[in-house]
Amino acid sequence: MKFLLLLFLLLSGATHEKAQAPRRFAIAHVTAHPASRPAVEDATVVVVDGKIASIGNLAPAEMPLIEGRGLHLYPSLIDPDTTLGLIEISSVRATLDTTETGLMNPNARADIAFNPDSQLLPVALSAGILAAGVGPRGGLISGRSAAMLLDGWTREDMALRAPAAVYVSWPKMGINRTPGAKAAQEQAQFRKDRLLAIRDAFEDARAYAVRDAAKDERDVKWEALVDAVQRKIPVVVHADGVDEIRAAMKFAREENLRLILLGGRDAWRIAGEITCPVIYTHMATVPRDDEPYDVAYRAPGILARARVMVALSCGGGAAHVRNLPDFAGRAAAWGLPRLQALQAITIVPAQLLGVADRLGSLELGKDATFFLADGDILDTRTHVLRAWIGGREIDLKDRQKVLWEKYRNRPTR
């Protein structure tokens, strides 16, 4: 009995090791889209030990070969701001883990709350999104985000970089004058108190950073902000209106922070003033009455022409991350150069998340984290056929495909 148990454990370990070991293979005659430069026709991409070893015309002899003729090879698409792994069913409170109690929670960590078994991860994988930024929500300082792979055994396996950024929600700068709103003076005081709380938090973190660690007590909240005030990680500030964006940029300059704007609905209006990257999340936002019908689609192109670094995001909703390539296609159709549209969902998010040394483009030495598609990934008719993370091919089955197959083959009578 003991012998059989030992044999089972050995075989299980060997099988697991084999499944996890990076493979050596080549994909031949494929149209490669490096993202860092224009597409390369009839390319052969060689993978050795989970890394891209070469992008050329020939594959080493006796290496397993995947025929890619007529197919397209892309680096992982990356949504830089999601709640994947933190939300399962938005209407079921027990499946929500985005928000901690209170206004100040810089110590909250998205990678710790991340659910590696979420049923929404395979849906994103099926769209070519093999990695994503996962960020907390709520309060003024929501916590710290993480760059996560979307396939793996545990959250530790899947974490690429944690923390990746500190999340801040900027207060509304205007006065709500609609009937039933609070008095203007009360709103102004509320805004002033919140802005002061944010500033005090970063000042406290600076003071904490120079404390005598041997004598002073440890404070996990201010300790969590030290990397931000020391510019080791960026501060992602959610701001949509012109006044909020200007105030956030002014605050970042005064505090010497690495700022990334999240949301950026009205950033196009002051594109020439924007001095930091923007994660634009409003591709599906209905325009206001005084705005052109296509303003949401044209905004990324306007920002890009003003030399603003632009990444696209589906706006945090875990169930909608699959729409990311469609959003990039819309941006390309409305003025964002096609290569830049691809970069806005690949290499730019990788740079903002601090993982561009591993992901975001097809380049020598980077992880073999890419996928094969039957067409242009910015075209909604394109299908993702196969995908690899670190040279390991992953299963692209998801619940939506299972249900589609089930009801496609339902009895006719």
Image: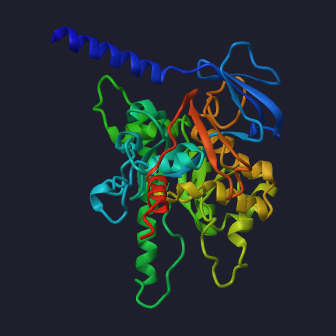
Q: Quadrant of the C terminus?
A: bottom left
Relative height, residue 179 to residue 326 (above, below): below
Q: Quadrant of the N terminus?
A: top left
Identity of the residue furthest to the front in this view: 413
Q: Nearer the viewer, residue 53 or 405?
A: 405
Q: Is residue 303 visible?
A: yes
163 sits left or right of 259 in the view: left
Residue 368, x across and y down, in percent: 62, 28
Identity of the residue furthest to the left in this view: 1
Relative height, residue 215 to residue 183 (above, below): above
Residue 25, x across and y down, in percent: 65, 22
Q: Residue at x 78, y 63 (%)?
A: 333
Q: How many marks?
A: 0
411 sits left or right of 249 in the view: left
Q: Residue at x 42, y 72 (%)?
A: 189
The quarter of the displayed image where residue 69 is located: top right
Q: Residue at x 42, y 57 (%)?
A: 140
Identity of the residue furthest to the bottom in this view: 179
Q: Nearer the viewer, residue 186 or 334?
A: 334
Q: Colour scheme used in the picture?
A: rainbow
The quarter of the displayed image where residue 403 is located: bottom left
Q: Is residue 101 visible?
A: no
Q: Residue at x 72, y 65 (%)?
A: 299
Q: Nearer the viewer, residue 42 or 358?
A: 42
Relative height, residue 154 to residue 21 (above, below): below
Residue 93, x across and y down, in percent: 29, 61
The quarter of the displayed image where residue 198 is located: bottom left
Residue 412, x across and y down, in percent: 45, 68
